[in-house]
Image: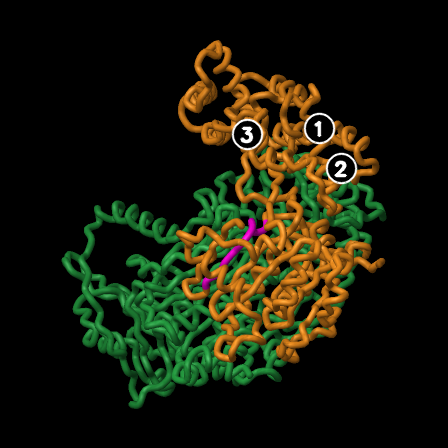
Chain colours: A orange, B green
């Protein structure tokens, strides 16, 4: 279906558009995924209505609500379903027992404990699914999918700078070696250059008998400070002192999160996103075996701000960007034979984030969930809460006393569910891995894996 | 339906209490809309909503009670209208500033069982916090920034208050860095937004010649002052709407002014010299993509384009204020900042990124607000002890809550819920003894300051030298060698309802001193005279001067500890940022601020 996207409008509209505040979290490419993701919510209740609202607001355009006839939930009038464009339909076991029915959805959210729904859906091949329930004070949320969930942009809060000072690409080492060398100009060097120099001096001096460490590097930084001026601290040299550990990184080390992804590169997957991602992983393997890569992941190109003359800093930044562009273009030449016409922006995004890619392993299918008994002997309270919620019959079979729920608990749980939904749709940020239990009595959230 | 549900959950007795409760919600924005819905569906008897703001397009990604057609309408009124037809509660909307003493005197706050803060700025948060400290009212503080959010119940006298931990204040820069020696893009943005823009389009924002410029270089000071005067000519162009002068404006600010700076050689001994933006020929082509860094020619074209549009508007509007959501002003500031960055060899950024910095935009999404509003509403039942199956909860057994950055979930910290800390004994707000002075308005005109002081001395036992401060305006009213105002009446020296007076024991060489007392001046009282509150002001051990330094250190430790309470999500480096959380932090006032006294420019 072709839709008039807000992004096709001239820039002025983008500048003032209603999604400005969230574009700052996941970018226009993330927003496009949010808007394109079709989501189906099963079960009609205050919880599902709140979830729909929380998905309509950030811009999910294609929402379906499947209600059960037995449900008595009355939609309050301020839930303006008409203006939200929600497709409403009734549960129809005949139609919904085929996987064909479900495959158009990017995500299905099951909010009901209805026995028929459960028994049918555990036998159907489902798209990625979130299963959730609330009782009076508690709630849980589980991510179910037969395929792994890959993330390129994990948006880690703390990232170490990607400087490659131990094994710089030629372009970088020649940049560092060609800086003006007189002691007075040390004060203009960005700390990365100071660290490169300190590292070089330390290695020359020690004939690499003992391993390099921070103390040795810091010693050489102090010597540079002394050459510059005996009294006072040059701000760039203090930065180098503080970030000395960045000169000790092993650039050939492949982080655990990347290796976990690589293990899955040939696992059979049917989701288009996963197939794309696996192509990137295959290209990454090839890339790593090229002499050019030197066993290092592609350079990200981004460097932190540094105290230095702006001229040198700009030149340094440019050099890192050029190196990253070269890596990305070589990477691109490897993926094209595997997947012709692979979009360039995705290649660049992947190369830029290659150290931070992540995989989450959801619960394989709904049956696994229901078969999960937990560690019987020493059940921790969150697992007990989870089991009781999972086994809790649907509202219509409960007596009245047990149907009542605290509205704030519903509101918070619906927030959690929609939050995970946006992460799953955008493939940005790391979604729940893979089960979360909220205890409204103690206000605690526990996360565990099934 | 709403009522019966809650009755079952809370029990008849507690439900009746809930129905009898009047609550205050300050803010009808991201958290506010969600919270209002929760409070209505829980069935609180009466809910007052205060918000000064109007609805903006960029609110609609999260504030679900508003629609496109509501843009420019009052948030408080619209929110109440959108929900009242399903509500069993009495709803009252106030489109007003919560800090407006005439609308909301202290006693007005006293009618509420609990107050919910769903605010977007530090100033109002601090104000409401202070009011709740005067009244000993429970306060539920909350805020979000992107995926991060927090709630903090505050029980005055028992738990930490909002000001017990230090909060991040706006960044400031020396005037000289902004005006003559920028070394980062942000300096250029501040220059464009807080200096250049108001100089051209909001000429009321005057810059005094007496300000502290943060430099001792006489030549530089002289140049900065000259430059200010020269801008009068440009203002005239802007006012007259003479579009042929646009190239002169560019020439003046990006060539001539830079050349004049270059003549001050002292400045460039340790800095890289700027390069004037020579020979600019403005073209027509504009880059429509706001997410990329434009070429310098495109910046110049867009600068001219935005200036032209603003000049046309000036003819009608007379004065234009910077607003990040006003495309013309945003484009002007962004292009001016980028051209200046080009001149000073600094990296440039896209308009989208500059908007975030200039507008101090904090990312905001519906989901975090839903979570936080849910947690806040539930916490209120705990604070009010309305949960049926629970025995009474003591204040220090209550929890605050932080939701973690999405990417930190792997560490099982989706939400952390540390128990509340006791009040910080050195908190500048809640460690102070407080009371309310009731005084009929006629007595304001007849009571002399000396009468009030003498009564305070007698009642609260301040036998020797004292000082009296008007805290609202930070002005000294009386001390041992300032007695000029003593014979004036309270009205004459502008003491009115809402004024907070602070009396301190200033005796020297005493081992024990009386604590400082803050008194809120409010209407009321039965007699024709003023009535002092019945509070006991304790003594404290006076500190010798030489101990002061040591104490400072201790203080820092205390504050540090307090701010790390339960802090598991955010690690060391990020600590200072943690309390910057806000519900789409938007400055209370959109006026550019140039702080004349301190010689720094505030990036608000």
Label 3 with label 1: CB-CB less than 8 Å: no
Q: Are marks 3 and 2 on the same chain?
A: yes
Residue wearing tag 1: A327
- Quarter of the image holding residue A78? bottom right
The number of discs equals: 3
Q: CA distance from mark 1 to mark 2?
A: 37 Å
Residue situated in front as seen by the camera: A358 or B236: A358
Q: Nearer the viewer, residue A332 or B4?
A: B4
Please, what secondary structure does the residue beneath circle 3 have?
A: loop
Q: Is residue B296 visible?
A: no
Mark 2 residue element: loop
Q: Which residues are magenta?
A: A431-439
Residue B394 visible in the displayed image: yes
User: Which class describes the residues within 10 Å of circle 2: few (<14), some (14-19), or many (20+)?
Assistant: few
Q: Quadrant of the N terminus of chain B?
A: bottom right
Q: CA distance from mark 3 to mark 2?
A: 24 Å
Q: Residue at x 56, y 75 (%)?
A: A397
In front: mark 1 or mark 2? 1
Question: Element at badge 1?
Answer: helix
Q: Earlier in the sequence, mark 3 or mark 2?
A: 3
Left/right of residue B254 with respect to residue B142 in the rendered view: right
The quarter of the picture where residue B531 lies is bottom left
- B258 left or right, relative to B416: right
- The reply to whether dot 3 and dot 2 touch (C-beta < 8 Å) is no
Residue B245, percent from left and from top: 78, 52
């Amino acid at each position: 279906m072709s839709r008039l996207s807000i992004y096709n409008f001239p820039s002025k509209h983008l500048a003032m558009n209603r999604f400005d505040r969230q574009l700052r979290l996941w970018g226009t490419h993330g927003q496009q995924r949010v808007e394109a993701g079709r989501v189906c919510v099963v079960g009609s209740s205050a919880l599902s209505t709140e979830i729909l609202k929380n998905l309509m607001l950030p811009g999910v355009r294609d929402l379906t609500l499947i209600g059960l006839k037995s449900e008595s939930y009355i939609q309050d009038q301020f839930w303006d379903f008409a203006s939200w464009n929600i497709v409403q339909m009734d549960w129809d076991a005949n139609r919904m027992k085929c996987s064909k029915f479900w495959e158009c959805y990017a995500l299905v959210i099951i909010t009901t404990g209805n026995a028929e729904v459960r028994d049918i859906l555990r036998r159907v091949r489902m798209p990625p699914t979130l299963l959730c329930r609330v009782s009076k004070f508690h709630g849980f949320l589980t991510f179910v999918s037969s395929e792994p969930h890959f993330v390129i942009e994990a948006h880690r809060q703390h990232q170490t700078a990607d400087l490659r000072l131990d094994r710089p690409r030629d372009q970088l080492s020649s940049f560092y070696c060609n800086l003006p060398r007189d002691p007075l100009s040390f004060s203009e060097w960005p700390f990365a250059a100071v660290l490169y120099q300190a590292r070089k001096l330390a290695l020359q001096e020690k004939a690499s008998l003992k391993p390099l460490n921070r103390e040795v590097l810091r010693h050489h930084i102090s010597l540079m400070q002394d050459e510059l001026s005996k009294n006072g601290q040059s701000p760039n040299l203090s930065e180098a002192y503080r970030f000395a550990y960045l000169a000790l990184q092993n650039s050939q080390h492949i982080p655990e999160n990347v290796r976990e992804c690589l293990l899955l590169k040939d696992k059979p997957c049917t989701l288009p996103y996963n197939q794309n991602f696996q192509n990137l992983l295959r290209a990454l393997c090839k890339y790593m075996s090229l002499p050019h890569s030197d066993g290092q992941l592609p350079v990200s190109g981004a460097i932190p701000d540094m105290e230095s003359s702006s001229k040198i800093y700009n030149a340094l930044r440019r050099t890192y960007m050029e190196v990253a562009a070269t890596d990305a273009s070589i990477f691109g030449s490897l993926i094209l034979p595997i997947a012709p016409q692979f979009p360039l922006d995705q290649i660049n995004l992947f190369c830029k984030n290659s150290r931070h890619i992540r995989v989450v392993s959801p619960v394989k299918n709904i049956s696994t969930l229901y078969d999960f008994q937990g560690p019987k002997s020493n059940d921790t309270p969150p697992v007990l809460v989870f089991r009781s919620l999972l086994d809790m019959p649907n509202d219509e079979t409960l007596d009245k006393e047990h149907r009542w729920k605290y509205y704030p608990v519903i509101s918070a749980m619906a927030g959690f569910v929609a939050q995970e939904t946006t992460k799953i749709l955008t493939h940005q940020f790391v979604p729940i891995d893979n089960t979360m239990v909220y205890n409204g009595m103690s206000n605690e959230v526990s996360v565990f894996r099934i | 339906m709403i009522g019966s549900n809650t009755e079952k959950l809370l029990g008849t007795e507690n439900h009746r209490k809930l129905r009898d409760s009047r609550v205050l919600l300050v803010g009808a924005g991201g958290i506010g809309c969600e919270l209002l819905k929760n409070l209505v569906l829980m069935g609180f008897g009466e809910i007052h909503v205060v918000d000064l703001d109007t609805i903006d397009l960029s609110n609609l990604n999260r504030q679900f009670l508003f629609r496109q057609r509501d843009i420019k309408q009052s948030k408080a009124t619209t929110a109440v209208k959108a929900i009242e037809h399903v509500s069993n509660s009495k709803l009252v909307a106030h489109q007003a500033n919560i800090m407006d003493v005439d609308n909301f005197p202290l006693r007005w706050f006293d009618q509420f069982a609990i107050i919910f803060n769903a605010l977007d700025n530090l100033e109002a948060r601090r104000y409401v916090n202070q009011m709740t400290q005067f009244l000993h009212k429970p306060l539920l503080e909350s805020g979000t920034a992107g995926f991060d959010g927090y709630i903090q119940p505050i029980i005055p006298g028992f738990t930490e208050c909002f000001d017990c931990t230090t909060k991040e204040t706006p960044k400031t820069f020396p005037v000289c860095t902004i005006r003559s020696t920028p070394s980062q893009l942000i300096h250029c943005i501040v220059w464009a937004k807080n200096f250049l823009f108001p100089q051209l389009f909001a000429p009321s924002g005057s810059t005094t010649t007496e300000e502290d410029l943060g430099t001792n270089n006489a030549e530089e000071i002289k140049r900065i002052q000259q430059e200010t005067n020269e801008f009068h000519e440009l203002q005239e162009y802007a006012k007259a709407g003479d579009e042929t002068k646009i190239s002169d404006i560019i020439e003046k600010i990006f060539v001539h002014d830079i050349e004049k700076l270059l003549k001050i050689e002292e400045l460039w001994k340790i800095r890289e010299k700027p390069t004037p933006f020579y020979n600019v020929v403005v073209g027509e082509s504009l880059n429509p993509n706001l997410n990329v860094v434009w070429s310098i020619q495109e910046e110049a074209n867009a600068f001219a384009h935005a200036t032209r549009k603003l000049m046309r508007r000036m003819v009608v509007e007379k004065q234009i204020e910077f607003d990040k959501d006003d495309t013309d002003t945003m484009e002007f500031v962004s292009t001016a900042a980028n051209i200046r960055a080009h001149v000073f060899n600094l990296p440039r950024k896209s308009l989208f990124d500059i908007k975030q910095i200039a507008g101090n935009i904090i990312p905001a999404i519906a989901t975090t607000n839903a979570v936080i509003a849910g947690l806040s509403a539930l916490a209120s039942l705990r604070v009010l002890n309305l949960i049926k199956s629970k025995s009474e909860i003591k204040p220090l057994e209550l929890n605050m809550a932080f939701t973690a950055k999405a990417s930190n979930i792997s560490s099982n910290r989706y939400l952390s819920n540390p128990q509340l800390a006791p009040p910080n004994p050195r908190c500048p707000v809640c460690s102070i003894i407080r009371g309310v002075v009731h005084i009929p308005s006629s007595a304001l005109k007849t009571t002399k300051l000396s009468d009030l002081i003498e009564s305070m001395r007698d009642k609260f036992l301040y036998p020797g030298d004292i000082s009296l401060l008007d805290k609202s305006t930070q002005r000294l009213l009386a001390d041992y060698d300032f007695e000029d105002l003593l014979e004036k009446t309270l009205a004459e020296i502008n003491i009115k309802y809402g004024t907070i007076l602070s009396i301190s024991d200033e005796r020297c060489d005493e081992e024990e001193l009386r604590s400082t007392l803050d008194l809120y001046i409010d209407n009321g009282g039965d007699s024709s005279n003023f009535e002092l509150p019945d509070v006991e002001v304790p003594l404290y051990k006076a500190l010798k001067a030489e101990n002061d330094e040591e104490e400072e250190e201790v203080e820092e430790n205390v504050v540090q500890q307090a701010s790390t309470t339960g802090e598991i999500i955010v690690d060391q480096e990020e600590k200072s940022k943690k309390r910057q959380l806000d519900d789409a932090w938007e400055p209370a006032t959109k006026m550019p601020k140039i702080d004349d006294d301190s010689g720094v420019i505030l990036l608000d």
